[in-house]
Image: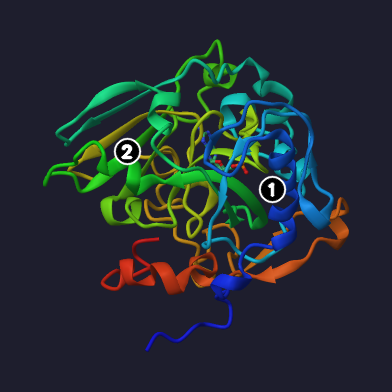
Amino acid sequence: MRIRRPTEPRPSEITPPSVYAERRNVLKALGLGLSAGWGATTGALTLGANALTTPARTALVTIPSPLSTRETPSSYTDITTYNNFYEFGLDKSDPAANAHTLKPRPWKVTIDGACDKPGTFDLDELIKPHALEDRIYRFRCVEAWSMVIPWVGFPLGALLKRFAPDSRAKFVEFTTLQDPLQMPGQRRAVLHWPYREGLRMDEAMHPLAILAVGLYGAALPNQNGAPLRLVVPWKYGFKNIKSIVRIRFTERAPATAWNTAAPEEYGFFANVNPAVDHPRWSQAQERRIGGGNSLFTARLDTQLFNGYGAQVAPLYRSLDLRKWF
Ligand code: MTE
């Protein structure tokens, strides 16, 4: 029998109904129905009882995911103004101020490496076969702050399967756009550009790993990684690579941006783990961003695998998590 951990929500409890009731009303009023895809209108989209409002943006047509957390989402303002995106500067406020130079359409993505059906695709064509889901995920940064983010995305594994990875495909490498005109921060050698990340194949195929194209029911703002970014909720934030232009199946673990820059501080796996400290600070607790006043932000005990252990711990059964951090 499967025993539910106290932190694991019941499927019926997962999505705050108010969040979606309001959305359904908005979509009904707009005549968009509930099939997944890109909406055709603009306007403020208010998401339920929390009165969290996105600025006027094109609404995405989505379905709720049973994999969402029940926790209250962080505000749209916090999610879109407190960012890490070194291609646009090193301060948390820099991406919101500077990412307007990024042009998220038209956008091409190459999928290649150890697979039978490689190719380069227009992003909208690439997304089309996938139903867009609302997935509210906890997000834990390695700098010991966290948020709860209502993503719009679809399972990474479903996309990967379409390109028929072959028996050599043991890992997946992701690469961000390299274009210093659109990403002026790439003129400074703070990281080895372009930003790269990677997952083991079984991690990439896990249903919790998604590619996000939106948040709060609308397209991703540039600072959050438009038009396509990875979201792997049981890992530290730096695994969540933004503005992806290439996905490559590889035989060996790919070199990744932070692991290359500081291997003793940032491991390839980067699973959230309160028992394994960063060499320069503890990872046992986190500060939940929100409420507008940092003095009163909640301090929480960080959970192994960011609270997703019931789902992902089996992936690491044979791994020493202290050695493979
Ligand atoms: N992707 C790229 N291309 N460049 C970056 O600097 N920063 C990473 C990750 N993805 C980063 C990136 C880090 S350190 C974090 S914590 C998350 O993006 C932050 O995502 P957010 O700004 O949407 O919260």
Quarter location, residue 306:
bottom right
In the figure, is residue 81 to the left or right of 123? right
In the figure, is residue 253 to the left or right of 217? left
Residue 173 - label: 2
| For residue 316, above or below residue 152 | below
| For residue 16, above or below residue 313 | above
Quarter location, residue 152:
top right
Quarter location, residue 168:
top left
Give the foreground label among 2 and 1: 1
View quadrant of ligand 1: top right
Question: Which sits in the foreground, 150 or 258?
Answer: 150
Q: Quadrant of the N terminus?
A: bottom left
What's the residue type where badge 2 is placed? Glu
Q: Does the residue at mark 2 contact the one at mark 1 (Cβ under 8 Å)? A: no
- Name the residue located 44 percent from the left edge and 31 percent from the top edge: 195
Q: Position of residue 182 (x, y in %)?
A: 56, 14
Is residue 74 in view?
Answer: no
Which residue is under mark 1?
A: 24
- Name the residue located 38 percent from the left edge and 29 percent from the top edge: 126
In the figure, is residue 294 to the left or right of 16? right
Q: Residue furthest bottom?
A: 1
| For residue 257, above or below residue 5 | above
- Name the residue located 40 percent from the left edge and 44 percent from the top edge: 259
SS type, badge 1? helix
Question: Which sits in the foreground, 158 or 294?
Answer: 158
